[in-house]
Amino acid sequence: MPIGPRNSITDVGGLRVGNAEDHRLKSGVSVVVCDQPAVAAVQVLGGAPGTRETDLLEPHNTVQTVDAVVLSGGSAFGLDAASGAQAALREMGRGFAVGPLRIPIVPAAILFDLINGGDKDWGRYPPYRELGYEAVQAASQDFATGTAGAGTGALTATFKGGLGTASTVLDNGITIGALVAVNALGSATIGRSRNFWSAPFEEGAEFGGIGMPEPFPSDARDLMIKFRSAQSESSNTTIAVIATDAVLTKAEAKRLAISAHDGFSRALWPSHTPLDGDLVFALATGTSGKTLALHDFIDLGAAAASTMARAIARGVHDATAAENDLLPAWSQPG
């Protein structure tokens, strides 16, 4: 299937992404800003999630749409990023109307990047509220990937992680896009090679074009586990957004989030572990004006998985080396 013009989640009409980061801290925030409130849902399949405002996304609950979604580093400290994003949106007059008031709806998820070589001596209050505010102010159709935003301090078992994105345009004209901060317990690459598990889904040479290893390495099934000797129950997490311009209900958006998790399984080995907080938000902007028949929704779900797998590989591929890194970037000579 063809990719969108930017190969980015912002190929989905009505979405912009903003990043803010602190490279001394080795952490940051990414915010997906909806130009108009978007139908949203969430699916959590990791055993160690950190979240804000996810209960309201269940199909049986009242609020139908959100104004933005936050992905942040900082573990539980990073949940403050949603407060900063909410403040920026409130200044713009955005939010769910309650009488004369407006309350911006900003679900959030965090990843653990506290042990990555960065300086975490931030004083009394962590910086994530301000980073969330800055990320909304920076929101654009074009944004940095790799060592940027929520991917700034991300790590996998074998290489630096990072912020990745990808898009697909279906035959019916519907666009689907993914944004992901890859900070997995496992690896996006096969054994000790530089080949990505996502290689069968690669479009062109978007993450190096080196395909699958030949012959297949003998260590392919070995579990490459990050910091195996010093694991904590919150030491990882891949957090993502899958988005489409189709018209979906909250229940359909929930099913889309579930489908996108298949991309985690295609791109990371292992995934969805008790020590990952793996989570996917789903957004439906409806800007195409198109609703989907059942067979079209099956195609959308499959594209969600493949697009997410590509975005994960691109996040690792796009990472760049920085001072005090604990792991090499994929782009560094091996």
Image: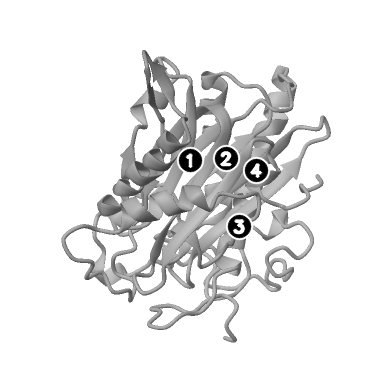
Mark nearest the camera among 4 and 3 is 3
Question: What residue is rendered at 43% in x and 44% in y?
Answer: 70
User: Do the residues bearing badges 4 and 2 touch, measured as CB atoms within 8 Å?
Assistant: yes
Which corner quadrant of the image does residue 105 belong to?
Answer: top left
* Residue 143, numbered circle: 3
Q: Is residue 109 left or right of residue 145?
A: left
Q: Residues within 10 Å of mark 4 (few under 14, many from 20)?
A: many
Picture coordinates of residue 305, whole percent (x, y): 62, 42
Picture coordinates of residue 31, whole percent (x, y): 48, 47
Sequence order check, earlier mark of 4 and 2: 4
Q: How many marks?
A: 4
Query: Closest to the observer: 270 or 42?
Result: 42
Query: Closest to the observer: 179 or 285?
Result: 285
Q: Residue furthest bottom?
A: 333
User: Do the residues bearing badges 2 and 3 touch, measured as CB atoms within 8 Å?
Assistant: no
Q: How far is mark 2 from mark 3, CA to CA?
A: 17 Å
Which secondary structure lies at badge 4?
strand
Sequence order check, earlier mark of 2 and 3: 3
* Residue 242, numbered circle: 2
Question: What residue is rendered at 36% in x and 13% in y?
Answer: 99
Mark 1 residue type = Val
Q: Which residue is mark 1?
A: 280
Q: Is residue 80 left or right of residue 292?
A: left
Which secondary structure lies at badge 3?
loop
Q: Which residue is mark 4?
A: 177
Q: How far is mark 4 from mark 3, CA to CA?
A: 14 Å
Q: Quadrant of the N terminus?
A: top right
Which secondary structure lies at badge 2?
strand
